[in-house]
Amino acid sequence: MTREAYEQIAGKVVPGSRLLRIWELEGGVSAQVTGLEIEKPDGQLKKLIVRRHGAADLARNPHVAADEFHLLKRLHAAGLPVPEPYAADESGGILPSPYVVIAFIEGREDFAPSDPEGCSMQLADHLAGIHQVDIDAYQLQFLPKQDEIYAGLVARRPVRLDKSLDEGRIRDSLERVWPLPRVNRIGLLHGDYWPGNILWKDGRLAAVIDWEDAALGDPLADFANAGLEILFAFGEDAMTTFRRRYMSRMTALDYANLPYWELCAALRPASKLSEWGLDAETEKRMRERHKRFVNRIFDELSR
């Protein structure tokens, strides 16, 4: 994109500002992420993030940028640690695809924390906070329904199954029970709550980012996926700590269907793990942890 386009965006967010610097941020998977540093009319410096969603997100939801803007606006007002949103534009008048402008938050991802169990407790606390947001008070009914998303995941049985991740056994089990009976109150779900979408500063969780997969549904769907992701990133002890902490905070939930939501989480990497660009050692470790995760679930279901 040209500098002129980003100058226009900066001017929309802070009229009279001057664009000083543009840089691309690493780590964006589903979106192109660009940083802007501007000088406000009073001489103060400010950093912004411009997020342009990718083709997959736009195909799923052409209004993903506007939806993310409205969601972040409400969550920021609720006091959750999310980037403050400043603008969204679907017109194509400045950039050729929809974008959202949000605050730059000082922090970084951390896949090797010095205290993984302490980090896992913070992750559990903040996920519980997300799931306790009053979806009626903050008018979040515009978000998609997680039940429908997972119904599609279960229904789309591929011709070739990923035997290396036990996809056939997972699908067989889910197809027997789907759709799951609704036993918990519908809540706000992040949709992709994992260490790659968390920013840390000085050992504290600074922000939960990348909300394009947010949905409404059973909180256990989010909880199950986060548990597997924490197992992948930090190991089994950290996952156990995360699970215990969350469950101690969310005592009103019925956890009877948790094994099936965990099978849904285990299904997500099927046929994709080899495409994630992992080094051989990391991929091997993740496959081993995935296998233990799935075996534990089936052990629980067989009792």
Image (cartoon, rainbow, N blue to C red):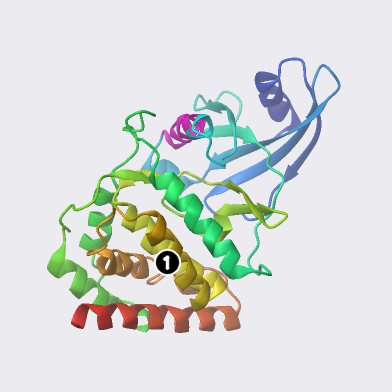
145 or 299: which is nearer to us?
Answer: 299
Span shown in magenta: 63-74
Where residue 55 appears, as percent x and y from the top left, is 47, 46
The image shows a total of numbered marks equal to 1
**Side of 131 relative to 68 (left or right):** left
Quarter that holds the N terminus: top right
Q: Quadrant of residue 243?
A: bottom left
In which quadrant will I find the C terminus?
A: bottom left
* Position in image of residue 175 (x %, y %): 16, 67
In terms of secondary structure, where does tag 1 sit? helix
In this picture, residue 288 sits left or right of residue 204 = left
61 vs 235, nearest the viewer: 235
Give percent across and percent down for residue 177.
Answer: 14, 66
Q: Is residue 259 left or right of residue 276?
A: left
Q: Main secondary structure of the magenta part?
A: helix
Q: Position of residue 211 (x, y in %)?
A: 48, 44
Note whether residue 213 is visible.
Answer: no
Q: Residues within 10 Å of mark 1 (few under 14, many from 20)?
A: some
Question: Eyeballing the image, is 237 above or below 57?
Answer: below
Residue at x 53%, y 35% (from the top left corner):
79
> Given the image, on which type of amino acid does mark 1 rest?
Arg
Q: Is residue 147 left or right of residue 65?
A: left
Name the residue rendered at 40%, 83% in the picture: 292
Q: Which residue is mark 1?
A: 244
Query: Does residue 151 belong to the magenta stretch?
Result: no
Q: Quadrant of residue 29?
A: bottom right
The answer to whether residue 82 is visible is: yes
Q: Tell me what residue is drawn at x 52 percent, y 39 percent.
A: 80
